[in-house]
Amino acid sequence: MAPRLLWIGLGNMGRGMVKNIAEKANLDQPLLLYNRTKQRSVDLSAELGPGKTEVIGSVAEGAAKADIIFIILANDKIVEDAIDEILRGDVQGKLIVECSTIHPDTTERLAKAVVAKGAEFVAAPVFGAPAMADAGQLVVVLAGPKSSIDRAKQYFKGVMARGEIDMSDEPYSKALTLKLVGNTFILNMVEQLAEGHVLAEKTGLGTKYLHQWVENIFPGPYAAYSERMLSGDYFQREYPLFAVDLARKDARHALNLAEAAGATLHNVETANAHLAKVREHVGELGDIAGIYGAVRKEAGLKFENK
């Protein structure tokens, strides 16, 4: 019999990941779904069709039924609360696969608590935008005991992910350290694109020519973010792809790591300051790409480019 799975967290990333597990993984029982806003679970379950998923009412209820528990939530506190609730029940022999972007120290602390209760833990943060989650094209970083990673691997490459970085038998924290360092590249990319497009506009070069250059030299994420900026998606979107509060959380964690290691991340400091301006201008629905608006305002332009 295949393991029974519970999925906790149906944000932008979680929904796409669930779709791929429900459609591609070896399951002989419905995938259990939990989200704090229950309607999101209900809607996704209906979209996936009968027999694929089962909506449950609480973390504890789902954990009691599951053999393997996947978690992808917004921040450290919410992840801690979910795992605390799981650990109130009998978790002997269960596997918790934690996919959220949280501080490495938080991951180590949670893993220690999980293992102390007789369960297993794998740190499994993922790289990729929501569209990549939908397409099953994420890259996962797996850290923890090899035997635990082997239990989790079947749900990643070829199901939710196109690639994996295997840190078998490495400390759990290494996966989250890589995740945070990797996310600084995203922050720096968005910051540089924003500054470049503002400079192109202010000098009279024009943003369309810089965008064409980006498409030819840096296709992929650079071109996608450039398009989001120039199209106005960065302020017109109803719901953010990469919410400003999550981006600021990642920046804070990365800056904390740098300070503890005696390193500096000046580019991240700049991006983080612009994210604060995005939060001030738009609120919690601001998007990381809104850095473009913040840089525009600094240069005497309107936040919105339309």
Image (spheres, helix red, strand yellow):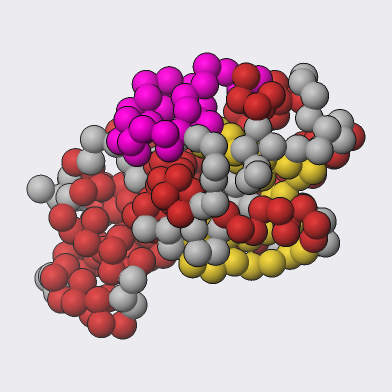
Left or right: where 222 falls relative to 250: left
Q: Say which quarter of the image contains residue 220.
A: bottom left
| Apparent side of residue 140 relative to residue 257 in the rendered image (left or right) | left
Residue 210 picture location, percent across and down:
21, 74
Farthest-out residue, front: 1
Q: Who's the residue at 31% across and 47% down the image?
A: 290
> Where residue 259 appears, x then y in whole percent?
72, 53
- The percent coordinates of residue 205 (x first, y second) are 14, 74
Please state which of residues 217 and 34 is positioned toward the viewer in this rendering: 34
| Residue toward you, 159 or 289 | 159
Q: Is residue 271 magenta?
A: no
The answer, for residue 254, to whether it is visible in the render is: no
- Number of labels in the image equals 0
Q: Is residue 85 left or right of residue 230?
A: right
Above or below residue 299? Residue 278 is above
> Residue 12 at x, y = what percent?
40, 42
Residue extending farthest bottom: 217
Q: Magenta stretch?
A: 32-60
User: Looking at this view, is 279 or 114 the one in front?
Assistant: 114
Q: Is residue 59 visible?
A: yes
**Residue under the point 69% across and 50% down:** 123
Task: Name the image quarter holding the N terminus.
Answer: top right
- Given residues 76 and 248, the one toward you in this image is 76
Residue at 19 percent of width and 77 percent of height: 212
Q: Is residue 42 magenta?
A: yes
- Residue at x 65%, y 27% (from the top left corner): 65
Residue 150 versus residue 280 in the image, above or below: below
